[in-house]
Amino acid sequence: MEDERIANNPLSVNHGISPDEDGETVNQTLYRAIIGSLMYLTASSPDIMFATFLCACYQANPKANHMLAAKKILRYLKGTPILGLWYPRKDGFDLTAYSDSDYGGCKTDYKSTSGGCQFLGSMLVSWQCKKQTAVAQSTCEAEYIGGASCTS
C-alpha cells in the first residue's frame, strides 16, 4: 500500500458494496484484520465510521470488491494523517454533555427538534441534531426528550 495513490474520501457515493455472491473470495483472516484495525481507528477518526461498518457487514464471506473498499479506506487515511480527534494527555477525561430542543419547531407536524453534543475533556467527540419522533405537549417534555436522546 506504500506506492498506492491517496483517496479523497473513504467511500464513493455510489459505492456498490453488496453481498456479491459470484465475486472472487479473498483471504478472510486478512480482511478481518483490516476491518478490526479500522474499527479501532473510528474512535479517533469518526469520518471513516460509516464506510468501515459497511465493510464490516461482509466479514463472514468477503469478496474482492469488499477488499477494494477496505483498501480505499486505508488510502484515504494515508492522505489525511492530520485529521481526526486528538486527546491530549494533560486534558481531563470528564464526559460532559449539552442538549437543547425547541418546542414545536416544525410548522407542518409540530414536532420538536433536539440537538446535543458530548465532550471528553475539552474535545468534542459526538454531536447530533434530530427531529423528535413524538409531538411534545410542553416545552418541559421537549427538553426531557432531547436530554434523554443526548445521554443515550
Image (spheres, rainbow, N blue to C red):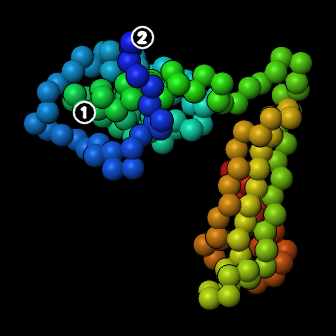
- Give the residue at x 76% y 50%: 117
Label 2 amino acid? Glu
Secondary element at image label 1: helix
Question: Horizontal and vertical percent for residue 70?
Answer: 37, 28
Residue carrying label 2: 2
Residue 148 in sight here: no
Type of residue at label 1?
Answer: Asn
Mark 1 or mark 2: name the one nearer the start of the chain. Answer: 2
Task: Determine whether 30 is above or below 102 in the image.
Answer: above
Locate residue 93: give its quadrant.
top right
* Residue with the most extreme left position: 22
Front one among 120 and 124: 124
Q: How many marks?
A: 2
Picture layout, residue 103 above or below residue 27: below
Residue furthest to the top in view is: 2
Residue drawn at 60 percent across, 37 percent down: 46
Q: Nearer the viewer, residue 94 or 74?
A: 74
Check disc 1: other Cα within 10 Å, few if <14, some if 14-19, many if 20+. many
